[in-house]
């Protein structure tokens, strides 16, 4: 009696299919983006900076669009409105027609390493601009509501100082980002031209 033709449990065809499926799965996993949308709060400064560079290269749009969003994000990151900075930055970027992704990325400037220094500088500058004679020697708060509890004078001084410093850094961030992405886009076009002419 002739046995029926059909796949066996350990046939070469089934083995090859299993190997192919495993190769495809490993390839797909290797292509996944390994950077989170926002790094952990206590990521080291070098790792945080490298992640920011990677995310910046992934931004899409013309240089003005990206630079405007980055300027908004940097401006908001200086103001004492934690933990609402990302929401406010994205909203402002939408209103001024800048890159919302770049705005969210710009708020990375505000982190546990920079917040104490930046906010204290905001407060001191605000006191100087408002003419306050008596100032605090240290500041500690985790949210805008806790900042309000420190008193109206402290809160107002930090807001005034933060808006002034944030505006200056925002303008600088705009021009720096604009020039960086002009260069990136030019290099990208040159690479496309070279690859096209080489074919």
Image (cartoon, rainbow, N blue to C red):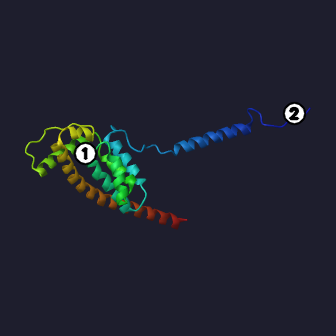
For mark 1, does the 10 Å Cα neighbourhood hold few (<14), some (14 to 19), or many (20 or more) residues? many
Give whichever of discs 1 and 2 has the lower sequence position: 2
Quadrant of the drawing holding the C terminus: bottom right
Q: Residue drawn at (28%, 52%), measured in percent from left and top? A: 75
Residue 128 point in image, percent of width and height:
11, 49
Q: Left or right: where does residue 86 sit relative to residue 132? A: right
Element type at mark 2: loop
Q: Nearer the viewer, residue 132 or 176?
A: 132
**Is 73 situated above or below 43?**
below
Q: Left or right: where does residue 34 sit relative to residue 66? A: right
On residue 189, the disc is none
Q: Residue drawn at (37%, 39%), measured in percent from left and top? A: 40
Q: Nearer the viewer, residue 108 or 179?
A: 108
Q: Judge whether residue 128 can be spotted in this image.
A: yes
Q: Residue drawn at (32%, 52%), measured in percent from left and top? A: 73
Residue 3 point in image, percent of width and height:
87, 33
Q: Residue drawn at (90%, 34%), measured in percent from left and top? A: 2
Q: Nearer the viewer, residue 107 or 55?
A: 107
Element type at mark 1: loop
The residue positioned farthest toward the left in the image shown: 133
Residue 194 point in image, percent of width and height:
48, 65
Q: Judge whether residue 180 can be spotted in this image.
A: no
Task: State the image quarter where residue 178 is shown.
Answer: bottom left
Q: Left or right: where does residue 69 sit relative to residue 115? A: right
Task: State the image quarter where residue 145 is shown.
Answer: top left
Find disc 2 in the rendering and name its residue: 3
On residue 80, the disc is 1
Find the distance from the CA under tag 1 to the CA under tag 2.
80 Å
């Amino acid at each position: 009696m002739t046995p029926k033709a059909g796949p066996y449990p350990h046939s070469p065809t089934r083995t090859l299919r299993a190997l192919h499926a495993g190769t495809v799965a490993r390839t797909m996993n290797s292509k996944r983006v390994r950077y989170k949308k926002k790094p952990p709060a206590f990521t080291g400064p070098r790792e945080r900076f490298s992640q920011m560079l990677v995310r910046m290269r992934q931004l899409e749009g013309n240089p003005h669009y990206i630079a405007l969003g980055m300027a908004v994000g940097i401006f908001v990151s200086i103001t004492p409105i934690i933990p609402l900075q990302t929401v406010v930055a994205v909203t402002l970027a939408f209103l001024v027609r800048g890159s919302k992704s770049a705005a969210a990325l710009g708020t990375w400037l505000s982190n546990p390493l920079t917040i104490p220094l930046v906010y204290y500088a905001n407060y001191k500058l605000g006191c100087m601009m408002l003419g306050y004679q008596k100032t605090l020697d240290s500041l500690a708060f985790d949210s805008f509501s806790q900042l309000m509890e420190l008193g109206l004078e402290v809160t107002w001084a930090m807001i005034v100082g933060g808006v002034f410093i944030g505006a200056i850094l925002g303008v600088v961030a705009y021009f720096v980002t604009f020039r960086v992405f002009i260069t990136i886009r030019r290099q990208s076009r040159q690479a496309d031209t070279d690859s096209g002419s080489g074919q």
